[in-house]
Image: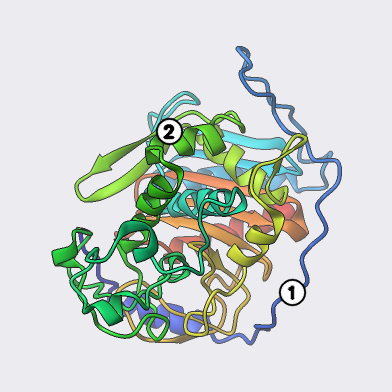
Amino acid sequence: MKFRFPVTFCLTLLFLGCASSDDSQPAPEPTPSGIYFPPNNDPNNTWEEATATQVGWNNSEIQPLLDFLEEKHSKGFIMLYNGKMVVEHYINGHENGSIWYWASAGKTLTSTVSGIAQEEGLLDINQKVSDYLGTGWTSAALDKENLITCKHLLSMSSGLDDSLGDDVSPANLHYVADAGTRWAYHNVYVKMQDVVAAASGESWNSYFNTKLRDPIGMDGNWFNLGDLSVYGSTTRSMARFGLMIYAHGKWQDQQIVPEFFLDEATNTSQNINLAYGYLWWLNGKSSFHLPQSQFQFPGKLIPNAPDDMYAALGKNDQKIYVVPSKKLVVVRMGDVADGENFAVSTFDNDLWAYINAVID
């Protein structure tokens, strides 16, 4: 499954991204106080609400936002303010109990569970992948394969060929460059799921459910879509995950994933694509790369979005935006807004113009 960015889209991003920004790693934000967490296993599916007026938003700008979302083929949309539900909207045949796929927004689930496994002492992301999977997991020469660490998988810098499709069998994982010297958006990240399974002695699904899904009250499951492993859930479950990340890895009084790991995951992970962490996209950097391109674009990933925003971005505009400075988590599920895309698209910038009208 391969996707190409049209020249017009790339030129648009080149134009939009020319604003200057600061690449210095910010000091970790203090954990927000007074966060609301919805209860787990509640038969009434309770989620405390707040009005736009109560949180200082512009109520009159919500309907234009919802109209735009409907026009752009959205299905589920949620905006949380410090955990409370301010906007929840379902359209185009979707309901609050409907399941939809996260696509590559679910990469962040793999990153998060990797951090949990490391905290439990099961793995070290600085160790080479072959320490957990054995040698021969790629078709690269052994000395090149052994350069690839788990961190390279999480940061998309394995050096393996990204032009051969989504199959991650050894025959399809070819050496292109030494690990750490080339950034390329590649399905090989799913080998981290195999690493977690091997290190824990459990299946990926079992470990994921026990350590992440169930403790924060998510629904949904992993399923195979061709050569891809994809997560599907309700829109509220996507919002639960975004809320846990916003809360620095906590859910209620339980630390689900270490805060220091999330600080790493949501900051620049290598020196090639400054706008990429551990499977998270980062705003506010001076340049960025896109999937299936080695071109460096100047400026911010999403110019209209706040600089401290980081995001889980999936094919055909599945979105989780986390903005600590605004106490904000935004989730969008649905069909592709405009042209088919891998992760970031012009829809992101257009959507943020409407969001800004609401929150500013």
Query: x, y percentage for residue 190?
Result: 35, 55
Residue 50 visible within the image: yes
Q: Would residue 103 be found to the left or right of residue 64 on screen?
A: left
Query: x, y percentage for residue 292?
Result: 30, 74
Residue 218 against residue 1 in the figure, above or below? above
Q: Quadrant of residue 315?
A: bottom left
Query: In 3D space, how far apart are the residues under numbered discs 1 and 2 (Cα atoms)?
Result: 35 Å
Which residue is identified by label 2? 206
Which residue is identified by label 1? 26
**Dot 1 amino acid type:** Pro
Q: Secondary structure at mark 2?
A: helix
Of circles 1 and 2, which is in front? Answer: 2
Q: Earlier in the sequence, mark 1 or mark 2?
A: 1
Q: Secondary structure at mark 1?
A: loop
**Dot 2 amino acid type:** Ser
Residue visible at 76% across and 40% down in the picture: 52
Residue 55 against residue 342 in the figure, above or below? above
Query: x, y percentage for residue 346?
Result: 44, 66
Instruction: Give the crowd class for mark 1: few <14, some 14-19, many >=20 residues within 10 Å.
Output: few
Q: Quadrant of residue 291?
A: bottom left
Residue visible at 32% across and 57% down in the picture: 133
Residue visible at 58% across and 75% down in the picture: 268
Viewer-proximal residue among 101 and 359: 101
Q: Would residue 123 be found to the left or right of residue 259 on screen?
A: left
